[in-house]
Image: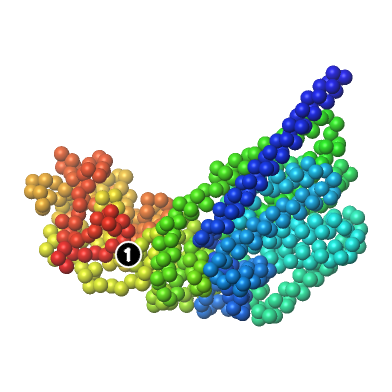
Amino acid sequence: MQFLRKFDTSFGLILDDGGRIMLLIFSGIALIIFFVYQWQVATYPYSMDYGEAPLVDQAMRLAGGQNIYRADISMPPYTISNYPPLYIVVLAIGVKLFGSASPFLIGRLISAICAWVAGICLGLIVYKLTRDRFAALSAVAVYLAFPFVVFWSPLLRIDMLALALSLGGLCMLIWEPTSPRHFMIASILLVAAIYTRQSYALAAPFAGFIWLFARDWKQALKLAFVVGGLSLISFLVLNVLTHGGFYFNIVIANVNEFKMDNLKYHWDRMRQVALIPLIFGGVSLFLIRRLNPLWTLAAPYLIGATFSAATIGKIGANINYLLELCAALGLAAGAVVAWSRIHIPATTLRAGIMILLVFGVGRMMHFMVQDQTGNLRDRRAAIHDLSELATLVAKTPGPILADEHMGMLTLEGRPLEIQPFEVTQLAWAGKWDQTPLLDSIDNKEFSAIIIYDVPWAKERWTQEMFDAINSSYTLSDVVAGNKVYMPYERKSAENIKQCPGATWQLPGDSSLGLKWQDGGLNFFGQGVAGKVPVYAVADGLLTRRVDWADAVAIQHDDPLRPGMKLWSHYSDMMAANGIDSYVAEDFPIGAENVPVKAGQLLGYEGSWSGRPQWSSWIHVHFALIQAADSGQFPAQISSGIVVDPSPYLNLLLKSQTEAPNIQSLNCSGG
């Protein structure tokens, strides 16, 4: 036993010193990563997140004396202010002082500074209650290393201000618990956090109440009365001033559907990234008050933050819903370290806890650098293309609808016409009539519509909006993954079925343009998927292989190379879901050598893009393929056997190098 005690003392001290040194080193690295990432995001010239531009727009409107909480959005602008006004007021002051030319930098600096303030408050809370510097450092290190905190900290979003205010309130509350002045400041800070983001009404006030209740139940009730009373009075005043608009925007408009799959996804991700801090959080709940002075604050804060984090299951929710939980896990880590340094006599075990925490911090930093910086890398890589998009927006007068990059409008001081995600959720919930907007789209009242081509675009725009855009606008370009639609003007030349002098007729409507794709051409028709016909370009024998759900091919005698066989191939005649086929029923799967005539209906243009639920503009992909030596359709299609269809259709088109995106249909000599 004596040997074991000596071994524990000598070896344990080495481990303990090593663990503390590693914590210092990892904390320093976390600080560097935190600062460098914040600086790179803060200086990025365009929006980094969908939610940034609406806040800038609201700040601009507020600075101009407008009501940002309108109770009626039946007329434009179709915008929603989902959050209380404090952050927007601060940002509006910045816009008023510095103009709309640098709102992203101003808003991001506010968030970045608040992130540092929140970290300092965490350290002060732990140190004040434990008098343990390494416990305080542990709390700060976990907070700084959390990828979700690092990622969100420099964004122009409300959350970091709310987190800093709430932790500042707790810090003020515990620093001088008997001081009336500190009590009132703490109460005001907690209310300010609530009026920055309403979900901050749970974790911090609950933690402050429990901490006070364990010492003086009267003070706890007083805190509840003051915070609750100030919050209620503020709500009533704002609701009266906005004629009921504050209630509509803050309560009614937050109707996003809750999905358990979303919650599971984020929980799995949290578990993958921060398993060790989660373990520390679970352990901390059992370290009751007599074992650790942090328990009456850290435990209720963790419980409240966990309940708030669970709302991340809502459609459109992001990792900002996890920020309070990240801070709470930092407090929990500080609690466990403080407890271990007082109540665990075995130096080796105590050092092991410290080293385990260090590994947890290292794991989170690794995840941050490897995975969480991808969004910044992608956006920086697209700066050149985004500058082209910004130039296009600047040169396009009049109202523009946009989603991900609506910040291009706010950078010019132009107001937003729509927040598509918010109003789409309201439309799905039956709380907003989209008819006036659809009428405006049908009437081509918008100079351009810019939609970020990602799967979740379907959460931002209703199908009725997509249909209206399809009917009245043409896809003119794709810039940095953004589809740019311009008002459609039908030209008589675009409505023809066959170019003058052409050997073959066109396969379908191309009134919205053509695009080179995989050696063939995408013909974009006007209408909706499954309704725009596709025709045989010439007489021949039709085949539909068993694996062709969306396609048919027709064998022809090559009119330009006598004696040769040529196949015309028609594909993408399928719905966006990759299941519903638009091929005509006359040609079932497995059909072979079916005689068809020029102009015979083959099916209908679809929105199949090759990826389920990632819809494309309605089109048919048309390609000409050299026949195999036997005359059969080739087993595999390669670039060497794809034939330029232009001579057969008598088209005058720019090459794919010259025009990689949409171009108009032009007949040779026309």
The reply to whether residue 168 is visible in this rendering is yes
What kind of residue is marked 1? Answer: Lys
Left or right? Give the position of 249 relative to 581: right
> Which residue is at the front of the view, 420 or 363?
363
Left or right: where 464 falls relative to 582: right
Q: Residue at x 19, y 56 (%)?
A: 646
Residue 317 in which image quadrant: bottom right
Name the foreground residue: 521 vs 323. Answer: 323
Taking 225 as reference, is 114 above or below it?
above
Q: Residues within 10 Å of mark 1 (few under 14, many from 20)?
A: some
Q: Is residue 349 above or below residue 53?
A: above
Of residues 421 and 14, which is closer to you in this image?
14
Question: Where residue 453 sits: x, y (%)?
Answer: 43, 58
| View extreme (left): residue | 562
Q: Position of residue 337 (x, y in %)?
A: 79, 40
Looking at the image, residue 49 lies above or below residue 142: below
Which corner quadrant holds the N terminus? top right
Residue at image location 87% in from the left, 61% down from the top: 220
Residue at (69% x, 77% y) in the render = 239
- Residue at figure coordinates x 77%, y 28% from the top left: 14
The image position of residue 108, as x and y in percent, is 60, 60
Q: Is residue 394 left or right of residue 517?
A: right
For numbered disc 1, what is the local secondary structure?
A: loop
Q: Position of residue 601 (x, y in %)?
A: 23, 60
Residue 411 is left or right of residue 273, and the answer is left
Q: In the picture, residue 340 is in which quadrant?
A: top right
**Quadrant where the C terminus lies?**
bottom left
Mark 1 sits on what residue?
Answer: 531
The image shows a total of numbered marks equal to: 1
Q: Nearer the viewer, residue 457 or 435?
A: 457
Farthest-out residue, front: 98
The answer to whether any part of residue 266 appears in the image is no
